[in-house]
């Protein structure tokens, strides 16, 4: 494939190191790297920053890095724990900072595929959180991948070393990475519309041929 590799940014996890959400995030990024993408990770402590204030003056170092990484990304992976059936404050605050890209050449998440994963202690909370993540991506003009993943933390199957022993979890996260990298490559390849000449339409069998019988 010609050109530089696509860049996939992972955002999520929780302040607790090695959380299930962070392990899921790292797994998707590892699959994306296996597919030839460059990857970057902002998780846990990287996201601990003041609440976003649109009129709050210059951004701090962590917030500035977050905005710069989003601007440089061809696609994103968002992974949030389900807090009371909603997006965690840590992840939502990070997404609020994307407002800083409102005047960018690609404003907000325009032109970027976004894979969404939610992790909860049960099916209901993770499913509702996944839906909320996808809604926020739509609001930020991003393109959620067809597959979104809702994980039950008690059955996700991550080992202490981060490897996933649950075949269904592993298959879903691998599929999400494949969709995300594929979209990023397709969008980059068709970023400039190609004008094609339309071939002449064949004569309709209902129109007279102009020949006399």
Image (cartoon, rainbow, N blue to C red):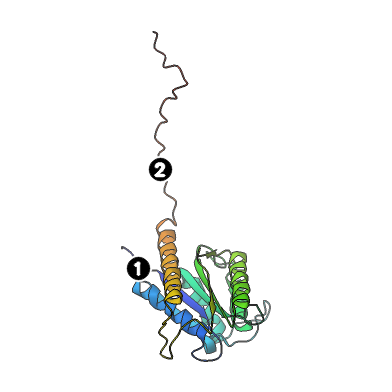
Quadrant containing the C terminus is top left
Residue positioned 47% across, 21% down in the render? 206
Q: Is residue 208 left or right of residue 120?
A: left
Quadrant containing the N terminus is bottom left
Q: Which numbered marker is on residue 4?
A: 1
Q: Which residue lies furthest to the left in this view?
A: 1
Q: Is mark 2 on a helix, strand or loop?
A: loop
Q: Quadrant of residue 3?
A: bottom left
**In the picture shown, does residue 91 fall above or below 210?**
below
29 vs 151, nearest the viewer: 151
Residue positioned 53% across, 89% down in the render? 45
Percent from the top left, x then y, of residue 13?
53, 84
Q: What element carries label 1?
A: loop
Q: How crowded is mark 2: few (under 14 residues within 10 Å), some or many (20 or more)?
A: few
Residue positioned 67% across, 76% down in the render? 54
Q: Return the residue at label 2.
A: 196
């Amino acid at each position: 494939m010609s050109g530089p590799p696509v860049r996939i940014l992972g955002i999520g996890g929780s302040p607790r190191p090695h959380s299930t959400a962070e392990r899921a995030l790292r797994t998707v990024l590892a699959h994306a790297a296996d597919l030839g993408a460059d990857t970057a990770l902002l998780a846990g402590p990287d996201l601990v920053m003041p609440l976003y204030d649109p009129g709050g003056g210059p951004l701090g170092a962590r917030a500035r890095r977050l905005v710069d990484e989003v601007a440089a990304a061809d696609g994103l992976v968002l992974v949030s724990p389900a807090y009371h059936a909603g997006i965690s404050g840590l992840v939502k605050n990070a997404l609020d900072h994307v407002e800083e890209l409102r005047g960018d050449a690609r404003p907000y998440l325009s032109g970027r595929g976004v894979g969404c994963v939610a992790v909860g202690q049960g099916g209901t909370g993770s499913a509702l959180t996944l839906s909320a993540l996808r809604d926020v991506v739509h609001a930020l003009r991003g393109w959620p991948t067809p597959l979104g993943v809702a994980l039950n933390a008690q059955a996700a199957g991550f080992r202490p070393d981060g490897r996933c022993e649950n075949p269904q979890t592993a298959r879903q996260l691998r599929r999400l990475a494949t969709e995300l990298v594929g979209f990023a490559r397709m969008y980059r390849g068709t970023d400039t519309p190609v004008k094609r000449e339309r071939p002449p339409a064949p004569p309709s069998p209902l129109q007279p041929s102009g020949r006399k019988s």
